[in-house]
Amino acid sequence: MDQKTEAEIVVRILKGEKQTYALLIEEYKNPIYNLAWRMTGNLHDAEDLAQETFIRAYQNLARYDQNKKFFTWLYTIGINLIRNHLKKNSNPIDPLTEINISSASRTQENPTAEGNLLAEERMIKLEKSLQKLPVDLREAIVLKFYQNLTFAEVSVITGDSLSAVKMRIYRGLEKLHKYIEEL
Amino acid sequence: MLRKEDENWKKFGDLIEIIEKTPPKQAPDHFASGVMARLSESAEMSRSFGFSKLFTLTHAMGLEKHVTKTECAFYFLLTGFFYFILGLIMMIGLPLPAIMQNNSWLSFQPVFGLLLSAELTILGIGIYKKGESSIRFVRVGTVLYAALIILNCWIGTFYIQFTKGFLFVAAFSMTGLVLAIFLGLAIEHYHPENLYSEAYE
């Protein structure tokens, strides 16, 4: 969906066509859900946080600057909610169960991956290690590599300078590498 | 320099490849309908102005919500401006009775006000220019500001020997300490600023 279409949808919602918001939800539900899942490592929390992100965005839609990208705005709201959630629940992560369930379901979804146990094992190690990273490093890694955003977009979303973002991603990769080696 | 940076990133090539190949998780089928149902139940779109916002003093002072870089810098600069005006008033506009004119603590108060003003202005500019990296410096500065207020009050009790004078010292110091508490709270609730930070409440 291009920026112009998004702006048109936003205008329609602001005029009272509430149901049109479903189009934006459909477009961005997977990236936001993924972001929450990678950050929390918990499926239930991920769904709650992703839903809350869309609700907050709807409530604040009047403040959205239509000259900017909608997804960047949405990510910013999402990342703020996730940060807050992680701050309040500093130790609720049960990554082992959640991640193992997740990878089992992924194998069922994708039978070709079944034979590749080594790759699967590396991926599980990676996901477990990701949950051990400090929140600021984790969010930088998730936004850059899992969400495939540019450094500039990560910088806008997190509110950090470009050099700080690069530094966080570098430090995150270093730690991630170390944690994987240790597992 | 650039080449060195590239080489540093290259060593994580394999790791980045694994991350990028990780299949994305799909949101549950009922996700969109769930959000729309929650919207119908509770959420109302906020308009750009509401009278309730006039009464959110605690929010404005950073007691509950995140305080962005600009807000934080604004609080410090505003407090600095307050002391600047107070210092000026005490310096040029406060006629002292003859009995108090030789009181060295009282004559120092205008300078003290201007000193605090300078300190808070520097902290405000520091936080505006440097953002998150200046937090520690600003925190120390705020503690120093509170310590100066207490020290000034303590010294004042030796010089002021009459009831009205004590009231002045107490009021001056209490105001300063309350401001220090609010500034400290603003710093504790500091949150990196971004283009859309105002959307999050």
Image (spheres, coloured by chain):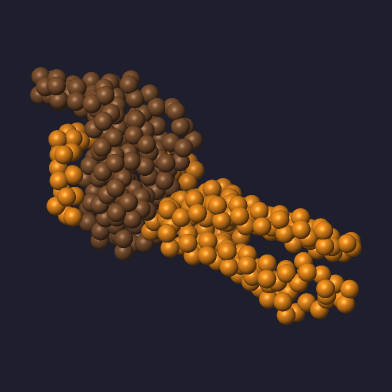
Chain colours: A brown, B orange
Say which of B149 and B35 sits in front: B149
**Looking at the rendering, which quadrant does residue B89 occupy?**
bottom right
Residue B121 place in picture, x, y as percent: 55, 66
> Image height check: is B11 above or below B186?
above
A169 sits to left or right of B13: right
Number of numbered discs:
0
Say which of A159 and B35 sits in front: A159
- Residue at x 29% of width, y 26% of height: A128
- Residue at x 25% of width, y 58% of height: A3
For residue A162, say whether it is visible.
Answer: yes
A26 sits to left or right of B96: left
- Residue at x 40% of width, y 40% of height: A82
**Looking at the rendering, which quadrant does residue A91 occupy?**
top left
- Residue at x 63% of width, y 67% of height: B115
Residue B138 place in picture, x, y as percent: 52, 55
Say which of B117 and A160 sits in front: B117
Work out which quarter of the rendered image holds the C terminus of chain A and state it.
top left
A105 sits to left or right of B146: left
For residue A157, say whether it is visible.
Answer: no
B106 sits to left or right of A51: right
